Amino acid sequence: MAANSRCSAAEPPDLETQRREVECLLRDCELRAGDSWFMVDHRWYEQWKEFVESGDQNSSCPGQIDNTELFEDVCSNHLKERLVENEDFVLVPAAAWHKLLSWYGMVDQQPPLERKVVDLPSTLKVEVYPVEIFLCLHGSMENVTMAQFSRTDSIHSIQMAMCRVFSLPPTCECRLWMKSSENNCERLRNVHMSVLDACLSSGMTVIMETRNADGTWPSTRPLILRNSVEEQDSYRGQPGVCGLTNLGNTCFMNSALQCLSNTPPLTEYFLQSIYLEELNFSNPLGMKGEIAEAYADVIKQMWSGHHYSVVPRVFKTKVGHFASQFLGYQQHDSQELLSFLLDGLHEDLNRVKNKEYIELRDAEGRPDQEVAEEAWRNHKRRNDSVIVDTFHGLFKSTLICPQCHKVSVTFDPFCYLSIPLPVSKERVMEVFFISLDPYAKPMQHRVVVPKAGKVLDLCLALSEMTEVPETQMVVADVFKHRFYKIYTPDESLSCILDRDDIFVYECSAQSDQQVLLALYLRERAHYRDYGSVSTTLFGHPLLLSVPRSSCSPEALYQIFLQRLARYVRAPNPSGELEEDEDDDDDEEELYKSQTNGISDDDEQDDAEPTGSSQSEACYADGLANSRHQDPIAPSEVHIRPPPPEEGDVHSMCTGAPKPLCSGDAGPSDGHIHARGEESRAEVAEEGNDEAENEEEPPQSDAIAEDDGKQEEACSPSSPVNEQAAKTRTCRRKKRLFDIQAVNCNGLERETGPNLTLSSQPYVALDWDAEIKKRFYNENEAEKYVKHSSMDVPLQQTTVQLQECIQLFTTVETLEEENPWYCPVCKKHQLATKKLDLWSLPEVLIIHLKRFSYTKFTREKLDTIVDFPLRNLDFSGCLLRKKLSNGEPPSRYDLIAVSNHYGGLRDGHYTSYARNKDNGQWYYFDDSKVTYATEEQIMTNAAYVLFYHRQDKMRKPCVAAPSPSSAICTASSTSKASSMQPPEADVSAATPSCVSAFAELTMETN
Ligand SMILES: [Zn+2]
């Protein structure tokens, strides 16, 4: 911890050199299997980039590398789940890491997050998360050990690890079983297979059994298994009504598979084995038929009627081979998998063996009909498969150059429609308002601001609620007890993320006579081992304007003390901090303070001789005195003076101490917890605080008495004017804290202890731990109140699917990042673009774009889209005019929905689908399948919709199950129903309605 207050050990080169060196290393570095890369907190890295790019030494030094935010638990060094690259962390090659480390150092006791590049089937990848597997022996399954493996490790290496862990000879004869859920267990036969290929994922258990002395094995299968083979032989359920076992974060895949499985033309194509004739083994764009065959296997099992649930292991492995992005945590998106799968199936089943080159022609004024037919013909000359037959449609895209007005028309095939949802132009932000009144608690407000607005818009909105002029507000992002960023009014609100803690400070009117100070609170910690003093930030930082004329240390001290008055008790002017007190009548109080002091005393005794460089005589005095018990005796609370009015000149100017009211939390009081703190620590601290508060009497008695004395001593007029007098009378008094100029990170500046405010508006108030304990009320400091705007419930918006489709066909102007090359102007232009639907496929997939990604924000829109189950009619918006005959109708019925519950990262996927044979709707949640009614289908979780054109739909060939038969089915599998359902891969919300209907199946093979 010795290096805590300094940026680094080595003198870093100038900023430009730093930027260039790291940039070079990043640019030249390729992924090589076995190489080490390092994870760095994204926020730190961005701040470093800003630092070296802006070249401003003072404003944004990122400080030591700090990966705290990436850890679930710093003690065990366990990473948080589902961290996303370039959002939570960045990966830098070893050489760049070592440079950054040598320049900035690292927060103490944090391990570097070194990760290896692994060679996965289709790509090289930095393995951020190793696979964490539980290991146990068949004989003692309660004795479980967790071990980490790389996806490229072999099953044999797991076997070797188990022999080591369980002290078995490496040559012992054993069998390994993989348990992926409560009721699924499989033998790992091929020990040369990789962890990846075996589909072992985090959270699974590997069970080892060793051969008995008599040559037999302990069991034909480990006892945890219900041997379900016989049961399945007898099971004859409705074909297609079959769950899919979750193989560890595979609900997105299961959801997509259920939708496709319930797409009649595709499933019949596979069930009738037509695919065998059409497998394309030579298509370089395909997967040698492997995806199609693996998919066919899953479909045939699901529609055999033999299984309650199928384990899509081989299929998952193949998908992982061909698209390793689905192995990571970043892109678990059922729509992306669908897109990949439809493309993979198409190429694997493409009837065109040799794709000819076709030059695409622009319309050049020819009639749409002609151009569209030509485009479709050309598409079919290269792409001809069951996927094209079933899912492909054609849309018209019209681009107009804004300069020369060149009109370019093309007709492009599509496999699904990605439909935008109307995005609100407004944004709801939650911010804390800090009044100038030192006794006012922070107030949390909910304000509505324009999404594309500026920080000024936030201030204006807040100004309406608070009646504080927007010119007297300063907006800041507070992170880990310091200002991560102080915004100027013209900065864009898009820089502020919803998860940021935004504080808006009221400041007195700005003028040349005022200087705006950023105030940090720091606690000194003494370390015996190092013999040095370091500081840790605590509490919430403050912004306040002070008159330039009162920047003397003593005046500042009084101003700061006043600003903190709500939660900092001013010392008794009769010398509470200097003299011994013999106010120990109260034994309980004495006992308490002694107990509090014991451990600290030990440390301080050792630390004292070295001390901090700032320690002066009085500081040492303070230390000595701080060991004595708090002189305040428990007594009446009634002498507490009334809280001052806002703007009360007397209370603002005298610096007279005010009592701390520790027990006055209103019903709406809450605690603001500084982000980035360990939650466990918070709980512990809070617990302590409360305990202390209960025991500790309110200090009003002593203070009320002090009040008078102080006024006698320090005259009631302004500290600015009475500077001299005050210094005279108060000089010998020990201060609660020392004032120290710091940089924006709260680190010591190199300029030395002299406070020069003109050059540096950041100051830290350094507290001794013991004094802080006595005078700083942490519980009170964390309190805040909620403004009534917080009570207004957020509205849920509903839109019609047709509105979204209209949005899809609305004229838009291309964005800067994605211009169009105008062949006439011969340069890129921000053309206007309009999409129109020309022809629609038999099965129309509509992807609702719930995930909105912009440069700065990622959000999930939970708008309810009102989509029809029947008669979705496109006749009004199809561009192709009705031909005399042969024109297919354009009415569709819903057949399947892929649902997404939860937020951006921790989502869960399920699906609703209608069985093609009996017309009944079902709800598929991994291996669990339940009946569903049509009323349940439309929710704000609907993410991908499958529609079937009415003319192609067939009447159900078997009767739909009646409610009574449903119960019958469920009871016939009562054995299965009594089992625990397989663990969902996330604790996602499933619709509460599910439990209301009969459970059909919960079985695995
Ligand atoms: Zn042009």
Image: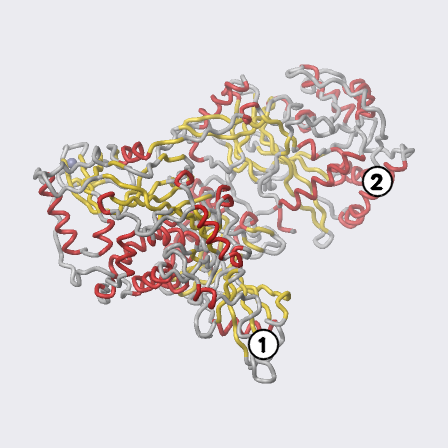
x, y percentage for residue 541? 60, 33
Numbered disc 1: secondary structure: loop
The residue sitting at 71% across, 50% down in the picture is: 527
- Real-space CA distance between mark 2 and mark 1, rounded to the nearest whole angstrom: 61 Å
Q: Which mark is residue 959?
A: none
Q: Nearer the viewer, mark 2 or mark 1?
A: 1
Q: Position of residue 588 (x, y in %)?
A: 87, 37
- Please name whichever residue, 380 or 225, is drawn nearer the observer in this view of the structure: 225
Q: Position of residue 374 (x, y in %)?
A: 11, 47
Q: Could you say whether the residue bearing mark 2 is in a helix, strand or loop?
A: helix
Q: Residues within 10 Å of mark 2 (few under 14, many from 20)?
A: some
Q: Which residue is mark 2?
A: 592
* Picture quadrant of residue 873: top left
Q: Are marks 2 and 1 in contact (CB under 8 Å)?
A: no
Crowd rating for badge 1 (residues with CA inside 10 Å; few <14, some 14–19, many 20+):
some
Q: In the image, which disc is placed on residue 218?
A: 1
Ligand 1 neighbours mark 2 (CB distance < 8 Å): no
